[in-house]
Every structure is written in structure tokens, then in C-alpha cells.
Image: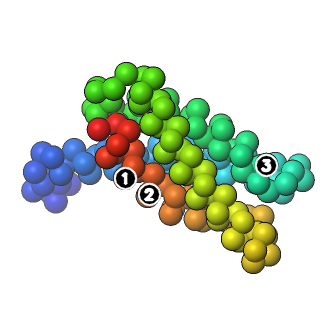
Amino acid sequence: MKILSRLSPEHRALFWQIVRYGLTGLFVTACQAAIYWCLAALAGLHVQLANLIGYGAAVCIGYVSHSAFTFRDQAQGDGHAARGAKFVAVSLVSYALNALWVWLCVTHIGWPAWSPIPAMLFVTPAIVFLLNRKWVFR
């Protein structure tokens, strides 16, 4: 906490926003990954269909969570319709990245159905944070 007191107010606010994003994003991404895993590995659905269903759930959970918690101090400018449309666009980028991880790991390389989950948990959220912060919730 001593280090935080040395930060400027803007950097301190960014730090706490990243912490909120990490908590919220981890929850949302874990929900998506859990849905994907259950549908692909346990229910036997095609991996891309399982990913699509997980994505749809994550978009809904994510918009509400990030609006109310992560970017609550920034979500002032656009109305819900404009912000929601931008959020869906960024979510499509997220979906495309996760579909890429699934294709690369499971379809192309032949690894098990769980193998894309690390990229879903760490790489995709980092990219999506930047897009949400700079474009959706600015």
C-alpha cells in the first residue's frame, strides 16, 4: 500500500480499475470457460458450438458486471445503446480470439478440449481490457 500512496491520483485510479477488471473479468471468463468445458467435454457438443454458447453467456454477464463495477467511473458518456453496441463489438473480438485458441489448440494441433482455456483466461482478457477502457467505457 505504500507504493500506491506514491502514485498520482490518475495512476491510482487506473490501478484499482485494473484490479476490478481482473476480478470481474476472471469471473466472467471463468463462467465462459466452465460453460465451454461442460458442453464440449461432458455433453459432447462440437467445441465451436460450446464456445459460442459460452461466449453468449459471457457477453450478458460481462456487460452488466463491467458497467456496474469495473468501469463504473467511466461509463458516463454514451447511453446504454451506444455503449452496449460497442461492448458487443469488442466481445466479438473476444469471441474471435477464443475461437482461434479453440481451433489452434483442439482442431489444428489436436490437444484436449481444455487446452485453449489458459489463453481464454489470460491473453484474451488483456486485449479486451484495453479495448473496453479506450473505446467502450471511455
Give neighbour class at mark 2: few <14, some 14-19, many 20+ (Cα, 10 Å): some
Question: How has the structure been colored for display?
Answer: rainbow
Q: How far apart, in angstroms, are the residues tagged by discs 1 and 2?
A: 5 Å
Give neighbour class at mark 3: few <14, some 14-19, many 20+ (Cα, 10 Å): some
* Image position, residue 97 (x, y; %): 58, 59
Q: Secondary structure at mark 2?
A: helix
Q: Nearer the viewer, residue 90 or 113?
A: 90
Residue behind mark 3: 49
Q: Residue at x 51, y 41 (%)?
A: 89
Q: Quadrant of residue 126?
A: bottom left
* Residue 127, disc: 2
Q: Is residue 38 in sight in this rendering? A: no
Residue behind mark 1: 130
Q: Quadrant of the N terminus?
A: bottom left
Tell me: 4 left or right of 94. left
Q: Amino acid at mark 1?
A: Leu
* Image position, residue 109 (x, y; %): 75, 77
Residue 120 drawn above or below residue 50: below
Tell me: 66 left or right of 9. right
Q: How far apart, in angstroms, are the residues tagged by discs 3 and 1?
A: 27 Å
Q: Nearer the viewer, residue 29 or 6?
A: 29
Of callouts 3 and 1, which one flags the residue occurring earlier in the amino acid sequence?
3
The residue lying furthest to the bottom in this view is 109
Tell me: 39 left or right of 63. right
Q: Amino acid at mark 2?
A: Ile
Please report contact status of discs 1 and 2: CB closer than 8 Å, yes or no.
yes
Q: Amino acid at mark 3?
A: Leu
Give neighbour class at mark 1: few <14, some 14-19, many 20+ (Cα, 10 Å): few
